[in-house]
Image: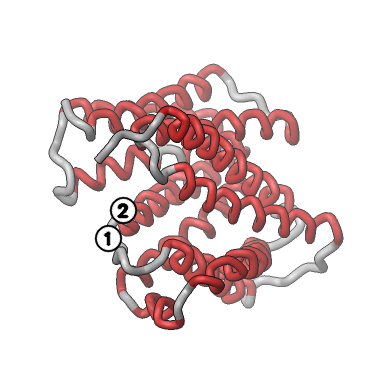
Amino acid sequence: MRSPDPSANQRGMALMTAAMACYVLNDTCVKLTTHSLAAGQVLALRGIAATIMVAAIALRSARREDLHAILRPVVALRCGLEITTAALSVAALSLASLGLVTAVTMAAPVMIGLGAVAMGWEPVRGRRVAAVLAGFAGVLLVVRPSAGGEGAWGAGFALLCAASLAARDLVTRRLPRDIPSTVIALLTTASVALAGLALSLAQAWRPLHGPEALLILAAALFAALGNYAVLAACRDTDLSVVTPFRYANILWALLLGYLVWGEVPDAFAVAGIGLIAASGIASMRASRGG
């Protein structure tokens, strides 16, 4: 197998950075709606809009039998984990700052490495164990400033979101190759929309005004664009070069958190963010040997 050319890697790095920006913009739009809309309503409306967007692409090339993939246990499990990830993310964003939530959920790559070792998919390596410990130390440093009150609950939801995200990505490794990625995206997006509708039945829906409707549509668009940008970034590129650019979302979150809410992390949080990013990159390198 030939190595990707430098231009492909440069394209992948740019796409991954753009994808992370899209994800943070999605989170920003969601957070701006949570002060006036219930979590279930946000999940439902964003899910419906995103499903329509994804379906416009997926159904053009999907076969009818592909849609039956939802009946496969591994696909149903991934849909379930997509639901818990989305719900925990919205809950965390409603209670804590954008920068804190983003930083804590970036513990997911470290959890993925730990899970891969625990399930015997990858060998135990000293460098990976050290990276995992450093990553969780970073999480503790980030969470520390939010101790007490709603911030602590938000950090807790963000940590659970990271665990759900890690489990989702580990399950993704076991998805059958014969199911197109667009179909998986459609099924998971629709599942989140249905879960949001179910959750919203226990909550009071509030009138949707123009600005909130635009934020919901923007969140759905950014989420869909981010998903496709990640897929494009990982094709025909060197993943060891492209994957570290996932951590660009921390920088995007800090920038948008400052511009929109005036959030400024203290020295402990900055140190923790640095530890999380460094541990994730070190864990990825350790998985390739040494």
Provide residue 62's location: percent of width, then percent of height: 48, 73
Q: Secondary structure at mark 1?
A: loop
Q: Which residue is mark 1?
A: 174
Which residue occupies 38% across, 64% down? 78
Is the N terminus in the top left, top right, bottom left or bottom right quadrant?
top left
Q: Secondary structure at mark 2?
A: helix
Quadrant of residue 132 in the image? top left
Mark number, residue 3 = none
Provide residue 109's location: percent of width, then percent of height: 37, 40
What amino acid is labelled 2 in the image?
Answer: Leu
Q: Which residue is mark 2?
A: 170
Q: Neighbour class for label 2 at 10 Å: few (<14), some, many (≥20)?
A: some
Taking the image as shown, residue 66 lies to the left or right of residue 95, namely left
Q: Are marks 1 and 2 in contact (CB under 8 Å)?
A: yes
Quadrant of residue 263 in the image? top right
Provide residue 195's location: percent of width, then percent of height: 54, 71
Colouring used for the render: secondary structure
Q: Nearer the viewer, mark 1 or mark 2?
A: 1
| Residue lying at the far right of the rendered structure | 210
User: Does any portion of residue 40 appear in the rendered image?
Assistant: no
Q: Nearer the viewer, residue 6 or 193?
A: 6
Which residue occupies 48% across, 47% down? 232
**Above or below for 141 versus 229:** above
Provide residue 34's location: percent of width, then percent of height: 70, 54
Q: Nearer the viewer, residue 145 or 86?
A: 86
| Residue lying at the far top of the rendered structure | 267
Which residue occupies 36% across, 80% down? 71
Taking the image as shown, residue 142 lies to the left or right of residue 290, namely right
User: Does any portion of residue 167 appear in the rendered image?
Assistant: yes
What amino acid is labelled 1 in the image?
Answer: Arg
**Above or below for 2 versus 84:** above
